[in-house]
Image (tube, rainbow, N blue to C red):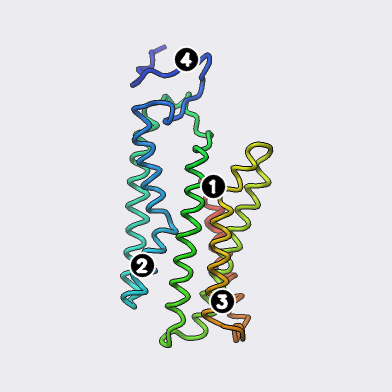
Amino acid sequence: MNDINELVDLPDPATHPLVHPLDLPPARRPFRIAWLIGALTSPPVAALAAVIIWFASHNYLVPLIAGAAILGFGQLASRVYQDQAWAFIPRRRQDRQRPLPALWELGAGLALGIVLALALVLVAFRLDRPDVSVQVREFTFGMSAAAGLLVLVDVAARLLRHRGRERGRALYPLPGAVAVLGSLAVAYGVLFGSSGPSSLGTVLWGAAAMLVAGAAVGIWKLRS
């Protein structure tokens, strides 16, 4: 049997059989960079950048290209650094299931909520302009409301999966979910006021479209 040439000194397998990049100083830096790039170029951040460009330019094509570029190149760069970090550890000893540090998860949950809330509020003020039809406003709000529902479902699923000490960790995304729900309430007031939407059916069609998209993403993640 050929000996495995380790790039760094790994912990004793008798006491520490599985290893994470955060356990090794040389692997720690690329892993942190990968996580940071991934957080700064996540789908919500890319969507917020696209919304800001759309809000300022009134153009539809440029925001889509910008959002796709931020998401695509950012996630690619994150994957490169992540692969570098895991390359220090032989595959049979990689601790892929270890959760991230608590502060990382809490920060990610807060950042996600803030970014989504900003994007929803900006979209609401943009849709409230006279050049946007009532049907577009109602359909978009329906999609946003369904997105908020998916965030709540994710929090509930985390609570069901975690028990004991880990249940507190599952609550980290909750502040973000509250921020999203608050921004939805603001958006509703901006777009519809006290009278409400003129066509509930259009709102429901928008919600259905978002739920179908969310289901498709969930199935893709389960199969990948």
From the viewer's perspective, is the residue at label 1 or at label 4 nearer? 4
- Mark 3 to mark 2 CA distance (whole Å): 25 Å
| Rendered location of residue 120, percent (x, y) | 48, 69
Residue beneath the point at 56% across and 54% down: 218
From the viewer's perspective, is the residue at label 1 or at label 3 nearer? 3
| Rendered location of residue 213, percent (x, y) | 53, 63
Q: Which residue is mark 1?
A: 223
Neighbourhood count class around disc 2 (C-alpha, 10 Å): few under 14, some 14–19, many 20 upward: some
Element at label 3? helix
Q: Could you say which disc has been placed on residue 188 in the image?
A: 3
Residue beneath the point at 42% across and 30% down: 21
Q: Earlier in the sequence, mark 1 or mark 4?
A: 4
From the viewer's perspective, is the residue at label 4 or at label 3 nearer? 3
Q: Which residue is mark 4?
A: 12
Q: Amino acid at mark 4?
A: Asp
| Rendered location of residue 32, percent (x, y) | 38, 38
From the viewer's perspective, is the residue at label 2 or at label 1 nearer? 2
Residue beneath the point at 44% across and 59% down: 44
Please say whether residue 141 is visible from this viewpoint: yes
